Image (cartoon, rainbow, N blue to C red):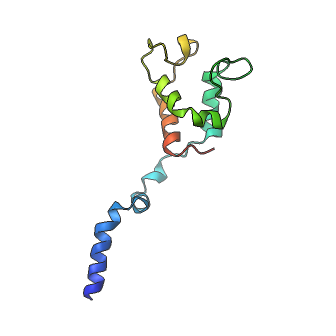
Amino acid sequence: MNKILLLALVAVLILPFCTTSKKALSGADKNIPLVSYEKDISPIIKARCSPCHFPPEGKKEALDTYEAVKTNIDDLLLRVQLPHDDPKFMPFKMKKEPLSDSLIQVFKLWKEQEMPI
């Protein structure tokens, strides 16, 4: 009986620190929509980053594929959140409307979800 109580106590003390257990117990992940490249990210990139980042017209870093966006996600997030008067702010010289906070959040969520296709 003491062994069972000891095991239960150990489980109660250790379980909250286990990442997998936290996800299973929290249930919070079920309420967050899954963001995908094909459904969510690609349409934003096409609408807001073309033609500058779409070869052959574009002369900037290509963002026309999943791999290109995945590779450049940190730089992309940094540049769209810079002050609008910063020379590195995107979209460059305000050629397109800046991304709204909600669109930036979509990119952040996609990155947090390990960038599903």
**Residue 99 seen anywhere in this rendered image of the structure:** yes
Residue 101 against residue 17 in the figure, above or below: above
Residue at far right of view: 56
Residue 14 against residue 70 in the figure, above or below: below
Number of marks: 0
| Residue under the image location 45 percent in, 24 percent down | 81
- The front one of 4 and 28 is 4
Residue at far left of view: 2
Residue 111 against residue 21 in the figure, above or below: above
State which quarter of the image contains the C terminus. Answer: top right
Q: At which x and y percent is residue 22?
A: 39, 59
| Residue under the image location 65 percent in, 39 percent down | 38
**Residue 100 seen anywhere in this rendered image of the structure:** no
Residue 65 against residue 16 in the figure, above or below: above
| Residue under the image location 51 percent in, 40 percent down | 111
- The front one of 101 and 6 is 6
State which quarter of the image contains the N terminus. Answer: bottom left
Q: At which x and y percent is residue 113?
A: 51, 46
Q: At which x and y percent is residue 86?
A: 44, 14
Side (left or right) of 1 relative to 117: left
Side (left or right) of 47 relative to 8: right
Side (left or right) of 45 relative to 103: right
Q: At which x and y percent is residue 19?
A: 40, 58
- Give the quadrant of residue 60: top right
